[in-house]
Amino acid sequence: MTPAPDPKLLADVQFHSLPYRPCEIAHRYGDNVHILGDPLSLAMLARLCAKGTVQPEINRLVGELTRMLVHEVVAMEFPREPMAVPTRMIDVTPRGVWRGDATATATAAVVVAVARAGLLPSQVAYDFLNQVLMPEGVRQDHLALARTVDETGGVTGAGVYGSKIGGPIDRAMLLIPDPMGATGSTISKVIEQYGAETYGRPAKVIAVHFIITP
């Protein structure tokens, strides 16, 4: 009996290894922080922040920027798997199969909709993940947050005023799309809601911001 050929021998050599290198700005915040700096995204972000930009252009730009960011997140951070996909050429040649590593479509993902500024980015991210992953493994949770203040009106952090969490997050990719990353209090409060004893431990927690402050 002839042994089956090694799938790697059947794949195009350029697909044996596909390192993904986004356009990033150098920094000293560590390996878990990625500051993107591609010219197109910066041009669109500048337009979003411009004084004369109003609705409906604001929502359109927020949607496009979110899709671009989530594309980077999936390409960089999500698990991969070997694929063998018969193409249209399979009808004329047995070699009409594309083989290579690609995003694992069975990856579980949870997107958090933060009712502070992140509702639209969360919905866009949720819809995007439903296109590239198996929808049964994609979930959207909802948290209502607002800033907390002291007796003088000074901002002291963020508080959670309501939540709708759909179940465990164990071994899932947890995405938190929040347009502005400032002190990190919002992200910290969101993570606190997913206690490991109740909801399990996610594979990764990824905060997705348009703008961050030092």
Image (spheres, helix red, strand yellow):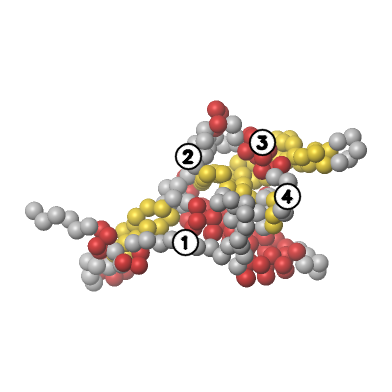
Q: Amino acid at mark 3?
A: Ser
**Tally of numbered discs:** 4
Q: Secondary structure at mark 1?
A: loop
In the drawing, does residue 173 fall left or right of residue 100? right
- Is residue 25 shown to the viewer in this render? yes
Indicate which label's residue lies in the foreground, 4 or 3.
4
Q: Earlier in the sequence, mark 1 or mark 3?
A: 1
Q: Earlier in the sequence, mark 2 or mark 3?
A: 3
Query: On residue 163, which mark appears?
Result: 3
Indicate which label's residue lies in the foreground, 2 or 3.
2
In the drawing, does residue 181 fall left or right of residue 112? right
Marks 4 and 2: in contact by CB < 8 Å?
no
Q: Earlier in the sequence, mark 4 or mark 1?
A: 1
Q: CA distance from mark 1 to mark 3?
A: 35 Å
Quickly name the residue at label 4: 182
Marks 3 and 2: in contact by CB < 8 Å?
no
Q: Secondary structure at mark 4?
A: loop
Quickly name the residue at label 1: 20
Indicate which label's residue lies in the foreground, 1 or 3.
1
Q: Earlier in the sequence, mark 4 or mark 3?
A: 3
Q: CA distance from mark 2 to mark 1?
A: 23 Å
Q: Amino acid at mark 2?
A: Arg
Q: Residue at x 55, y 51 (%)?
A: 31
Image location of residue 24, percent across then percent down: 58, 62
Q: Amino acid at mark 1?
A: Tyr
Residue at the extreme left: 1
In the drawing, does residue 87 fall left or right of residue 102? left
Q: Quadrant of residue 110?
A: top right
Q: CA distance from mark 2 to mark 3?
A: 21 Å
Quickly name the residue at label 2: 171
